[in-house]
């Protein structure tokens, strides 16, 4: 008789299971991997003091062999990433749409592990590359693990998985010389993009500020594909998943990004780590856009097409829960590097659609883990272990960590009491949604995927003026780095079909004309995608003028939590003004850093020593959100005599940041480009700290940008 197991164990037990493999090295004696106590790890075994090393040295061999095999293949894409632990809480049950426990039970706190990544660069590439960011979340739910493996942009470059290797080969460093690292600004990428018009939507997002986020904590996230939610009556609704950051979605400028990569290549990784370490836990709301089955064909685009978003003007996002990241990993390799996300990890109540990109991903991710982690037992690595019990007849393989008991491993059986037994749907057994299919087998693409231009144009129309300028700057930079004229001209021709003003600006910057037509003999040879006319929107397709949600000008601007404020000080700085500013800003979670002409400590006007956070020679203004200079005659004189402070201030002004100066600090301002712009809306001389605080919350003072462009920093 089959014995039924519930597969459940207590919540605390689950957390314990997850943490069971953490090794604490406090007060521990050094041993070999066999537990033998070691008495020397600095010297190899030699034949005499100056003699050769002996083969007998098993301690040397164990240490070196392990070292030789420390690396595993980095991810083919998304190699550079940072992760954190946390939890998900449902704030509103959506039982009517989904039977998933995680979507029904508002009492549950589901453990999660999130990993954020860039796509194109290698593991050691800098954080501020212009790139899409991965936004992958592993939910350890009571019904099994659910992975939502998304990005920080709501659409993808291609419509069919078959093209993914081509896309990635084109953006990766060129194969002859392996240049450039972590950059899309090169010929092969634009050769591909300009001949694959379905990429244009994700591409214009990648040209926008979204591709250079201020912080991983200030990015939106998207599941991209349309998924299904299945309720307990087995009814299906289409769904898109959204992550909305509590701190709003903010970005840096391209000039900053380039400089940050030099000043601190780990800027995003460090920012995430430090925020969690300081108890400022990153938080996102989870939202859903739900479309009933009956409305599947109501839109001007196909819900199965991953290059299209559902405008929030048409289907609002309903907030249903929140994710908080509250614990840094103990070990980067064991957790962040070895975590394996699979879009195929779903739980009852969530199901796939026929999106042809999603379908391909369902194959790719398991396959990639086999070569990356090297074993089909990768689910046994602690970070990948579900918190539910695992029972099946899969056995053996490299690195089997479990010791399965019993006489057999097959189904059906009587010798093991029929176990592991199957689960009926009513007992939580996963059953696929029974979608009706009546079709011909074809290798092709649906006509409903053919409009490649409406949504890039909608995106551009929805941006604020400053965002549009950044997009034009990005196209100009990227195409300016290409060497092939025919590729640049073809891109101009396509950009012109998205927006004429944009194309004119980019053409001017490139010193080229927008071509009236493109005649390329290879069009025929490279296939239907090159036939741009086929992918034009009809007039009726301009279904919306703008979608507010697409612009970061409409994000949240209320908080200064975790904003980095550089405080420029030298011996004798005015403690009174500083104290007031510090308490106002720190009370709201901002982080003040003292930047002095030297390291060590600095004395204030009240003769107290203060720990310096960075000597001016070791830091740059691009690493901060705003600058404050307290007064103090001697201190300001010293700052004026140290030229890097002038550069620091000019650059912050150029990047439209808020700057506050008290009393004598005005003399330092008078030593910079800012001296003629002291009435600028985000420069505060002897004003109340509150105004400075409000300007920091606004992120940037974009009204300054015409003046800022003239700063020679
Ligand atoms: Fe991925 N992708 N991808 N991708 N992807 C991988 O899996 C792949 C796609 C995304 O932090 C790989 O574990 C194919 C869309 C993220 O570990 C690989 C296709 C989206 C991550 C892979 C896509 C993503 C990956 C490499 C086209 C957004 C990092 C290592 C069909 C919805 C997850 C690995 C992490 C990683 C394949 C398209 C997001 C090679 C074939 C669309 C966030 O399996």
Image: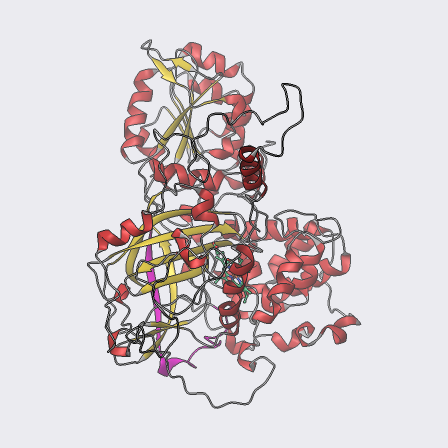
Q: Nearer the viewer, residue 683 or 104?
A: 104
Rendered-image quadrant of the N terminus? bottom left
Q: Nearer the viewer, residue 310 or 270?
A: 270
Q: Position of residue 354 (x, y in %)?
A: 47, 77
Stretch of the chain drawn in magenta: 284-308
Task: Decide if residue 324 is in sight here.
Answer: no
Return the residue nearer the eye: 494 or 676: 494
Residue 426 x/y as whole percent: 24, 78
Image coordinates for residue 440, horizontal then vertical, percent: 55, 90
* Picture quadrant of residue 688: top left
Total residue callouts: 0
Is residue 84 at least partly visible in the picture? Answer: yes
Quarter that holds the C terminus? top right
User: What percent of the width, then of the height, locates residue 464?
Assistant: 48, 53
Q: Residue furthest left?
A: 107
Q: Is residue 333 left or right of residue 318?
A: right
Q: Quadrant of residue 691?
A: top left
- Is 517 colored magenta in this rendering? no
> Magenta segment: does it hold 302?
yes
Q: Is residue 352 above or below residue 390?
A: below
Front position in the image: 40 or 368: 40
How is the protein colored in the picture?
Answer: secondary structure
């Amino acid at each position: 008789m089959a014995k039924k197991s519930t597969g459940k164990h207590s919540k605390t037990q689950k957390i314990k299971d997850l943490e069971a493999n953490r090794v604490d090295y406090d007060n521990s004696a050094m041993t070999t991997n066999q537990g033998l106590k070691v008495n020397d790890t600095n010297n190899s075994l030699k034949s005499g003091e100056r003699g050769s090393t002996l083969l007998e040295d098993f301690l040397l061999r164990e240490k070196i062999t392990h070292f030789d095999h420390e690396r595993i293949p980095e991810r083919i894409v998304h190699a550079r990433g940072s992760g954190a632990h946390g939890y998900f809480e449902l704030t509103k049950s959506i039982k009517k749409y989904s039977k998933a426990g995680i979507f029904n039970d508002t009492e549950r706190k589901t453990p999660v592990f999130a990993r954020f990544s860039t796509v194109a660069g290698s593991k050691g590439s800098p954080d501020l590359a212009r790139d899409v960011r991965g936004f992958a979340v592993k939910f350890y739910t009571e019904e099994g693990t659910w992975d939502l493996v998304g990005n920080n942009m709501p659409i993808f470059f291609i419509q069919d998985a078959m093209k993914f290797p081509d896309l990635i080969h084109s953006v990766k460093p060129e194969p002859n010389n392996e240049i450039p690292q972590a950059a899309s600004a090169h010929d092969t990428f634009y050769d591909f993009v300009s001949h694959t018009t379905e990429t244009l939507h994700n591409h214009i997002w990648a040209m926008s500020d979204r591709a250079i986020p201020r912080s991983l904590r200030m990015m939106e996230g998207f599941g991209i594909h349309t998924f299904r939610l299945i309720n307990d009556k087995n009814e299906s609704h289409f769904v898109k998943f959204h992550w909305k950051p509590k701190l709003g979605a903010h970005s840096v400028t391209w000039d900053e990004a380039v400089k940050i990569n030099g000043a601190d290549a780990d800027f995003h990784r460090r920012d995430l780590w430090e925020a969690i370490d300081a108890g400022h836990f990153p938080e996102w709301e989870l939202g859903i856009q739900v479309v009933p089955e009956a409305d599947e064909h109501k839109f001007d685009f196909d819900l199965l097409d991953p290059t299209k978003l559902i405008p929030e003007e048409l289907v609002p996002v309903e907030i249903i829960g929140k994710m908080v990241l509250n614990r840094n990993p103990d070990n980067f390799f064991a957790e962040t590097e070895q975590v394996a996300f699979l879009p195929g990890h779903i739980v009852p109540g969530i199901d796939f659609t026929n999106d042809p990109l999603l379908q391909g991903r369902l194959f790719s991710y398991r396959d990639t883990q086999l070569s990356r982690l090297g074993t089909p037992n990768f689910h046994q690595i602690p970070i990948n272990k579900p918190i539910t019990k695992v029972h099946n007849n899969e056995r053996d393989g490299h690195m089997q960590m479990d010791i399965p008991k019993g006489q057999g491993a097959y189904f059906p059986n009587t010798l093991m009491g029929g176990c592991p037994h199957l689960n009926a749907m009513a007992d939580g057994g996963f059953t696929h949604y029974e979608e009706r299919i009546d079709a011909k087998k074809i290798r092709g693409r649906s006509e409903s995927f053919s409009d490649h231009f409406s949504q890039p144009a909608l995106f551009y129309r929805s941006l604020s003026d400053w965002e549009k300028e950044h997009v034009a700057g990005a196209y100009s930079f990227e195409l300016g780095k290409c060497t092939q004229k025919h590729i640049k001209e073809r891109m101009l021709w396509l950009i012109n079909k998205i927006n004429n003003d944009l194309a004119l600006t980019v053409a001017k910057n490139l010193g080229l004309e927008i071509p009236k037509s493109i005649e390329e003999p290879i069009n025929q040879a490279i296939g239907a995608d090159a036939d741009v006319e086929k992918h034009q929107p009809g007039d009726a397709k301009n279904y919306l003028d703008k979608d507010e949600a697409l612009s970061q000008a409409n994000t949240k601007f209320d908080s200064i939590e975790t904003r980095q404020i550089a405080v420029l000080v030298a011996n004798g700085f005015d403690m009174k003004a500083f104290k007031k500013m510090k308490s106002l800003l720190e009370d709201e979670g901002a982080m003040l850093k003292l930047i002095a002409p030297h390291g060590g400590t600095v004395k204030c006007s009240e003769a107290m020593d203060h720990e310096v956070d960075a000597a001016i020679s070791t830091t740059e203004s691009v690493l901060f959100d705003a600058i404050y200079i307290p007064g103090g005659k001697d201190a300001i004189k010293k700052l004026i005599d140290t030229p890097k402070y002038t550069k620091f201030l000019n650059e912050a002004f150029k990047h439209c940041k808020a700057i506050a100066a008290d009393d004598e600090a005005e003399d330092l301002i008078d030593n910079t480009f800012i001296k003629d712009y002291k009435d600028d809306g985000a420069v505060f001389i002897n004003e109340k700290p509150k105004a400075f605080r409000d300007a920091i919350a606004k992120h940037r003072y974009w009204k300054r940008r015409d003046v800022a462009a003239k700063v020679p920093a």
